[in-house]
């Protein structure tokens, strides 16, 4: 179902009002888009949750596949550490974190290559055409995913404008990844639109002061995104592609 122009304009204006009230910003003038990768650009979350469940079960930690949707945004090392504390009552060693994340990455790479999230290409093309700077903001350090962005989104993501697990001390939900992305783009929070699909990422972006759009591309319900601090929640990147011209016209 598509929205008509009046509905879109109303939704945009309500969201911006909500954002200004929450953030205390005086204006919202989008100049940069700070964009998460897994589940937002790449339709990779089913594969990631499958690979996590396989690796974590193998090492004797009881888990469910869906719980890994909730950890999305954390780095692999942080996720492993959290599971170790839960199951074994101790931190994982640096070596365990490295080895187990490599094993999980290997399992992910064995799966068939995933597609892009439907509509993500239209969103990126619209941002490029309107002169909006794009910065990638991912907790991932997975090369197979990072390297394919050039062919999936030609001209979309400058290699100098990427925040990955290698550039931050604190991962999402800490605001650092999004604050660093704003610095890279040379923009203020009220000039930033963040695109996310996971509650931890939404919290990170929202606390950093960006106008935060959550896209529910996985099983996580809309309310979790509102609770995490989203300013707008949309059912798909396709819907965002429809709405974006109205949002950028502000
Ligand atoms: Mg994500």
Image (cartoon, helix red, strand yellow):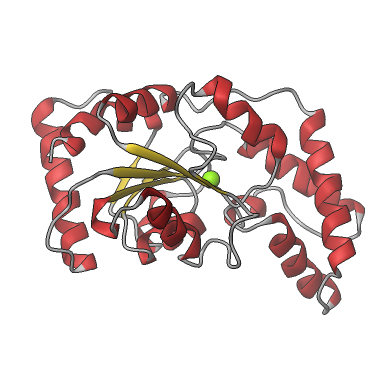
Residue situated in front as seen by the camera: 143 or 121:
143
User: From what the image shows, is residue 220 above or below residue 204?
Assistant: above
Asked whether residue 125 is in view, the answer is yes
Q: Residue at x 8, y 31 (%)?
A: 6
User: Residue 170: x percent and y percent?
Assistant: 58, 67
Residue situated in front as seen by the camera: 193 or 224:
193
Q: Residue at x 19, y 38 (%)?
A: 247
Question: Among all residues in the image, which is located at the extreme left?
Answer: 6
User: Residue 187: x percent and y percent?
Assistant: 30, 53
Residue 214 as seen in the image, left or right of residue 53: left
Marks counted in the figure total 0
User: Residue 215: x percent and y percent?
Assistant: 40, 41
Residue 227, quarter of picture: bottom left
Residue 170 as seen in the image, left or right of residue 119: right
Residue 22, quarter of picture: bottom left
Residue 164 as seen in the image, left or right of residue 65: left
User: From what the image shows, is residue 69 above or below residue 248?
Assistant: below
User: From what the image shows, is residue 123 above or below residue 170?
Assistant: above
User: Residue 1: x percent and y percent?
Assistant: 28, 23
The C terminus sits in image quarter: top left
Residue situated in front as seen by the camera: 156 or 13:
156
Q: Residue at x 18, y 69 (%)?
A: 24
Residue 63 as seen in the image, left or right of residue 129: right
Asked whether residue 238 is in view, the answer is no
């Amino acid at each position: 179902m598509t929205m008509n122009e009046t509905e879109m304009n109303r939704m945009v204006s309500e969201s911006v009002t909500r954002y200004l009230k929450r953030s205390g910003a005086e204006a919202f003038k989008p100049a940069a888009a700070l964009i998460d990768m897994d589940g937002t650009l790449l339709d990779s979350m089913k594969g990631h949750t499958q690979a996590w469940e396989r690796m974590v079960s193998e090492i004797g930690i009881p888990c469910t596949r869906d719980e890994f949707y909730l950890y999305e945004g954390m780095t692999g090392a942080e996720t492993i550490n959290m599971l170790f504390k839960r199951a074994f009552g101790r931190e994982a060693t640096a070596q365990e974190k490295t080895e187990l994340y490599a094993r999980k990455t290997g399992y992910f790479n064995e799966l068939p290559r995933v597609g892009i999230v439907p509509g993500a290409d239209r969103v990126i093309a619209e941002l490029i055409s309107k002169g909006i700077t794009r910065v990638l903001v991912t907790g991932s350090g997975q090369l197979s995913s990072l390297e394919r962005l050039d062919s999936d989104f030609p001209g979309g993501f400058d290699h100098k404008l990427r925040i990955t697990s290698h550039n931050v001390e604190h991962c999402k939900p800490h605001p650092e990844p999004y604050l660093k992305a704003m610095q890279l783009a040379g923009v203020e929070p009220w000039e930033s639109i963040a695109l996310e699909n996971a509650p931890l990422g939404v919290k990170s972006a929202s606390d950093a002061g960006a106008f935060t759009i959550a896209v529910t591309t996985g099983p996580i319900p809309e309310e979790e995104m509102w609770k995490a601090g989203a300013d707008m929640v949309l059912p798909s990147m396709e819907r965002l592609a429809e709405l974006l011209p109205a949002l950028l016209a502000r």
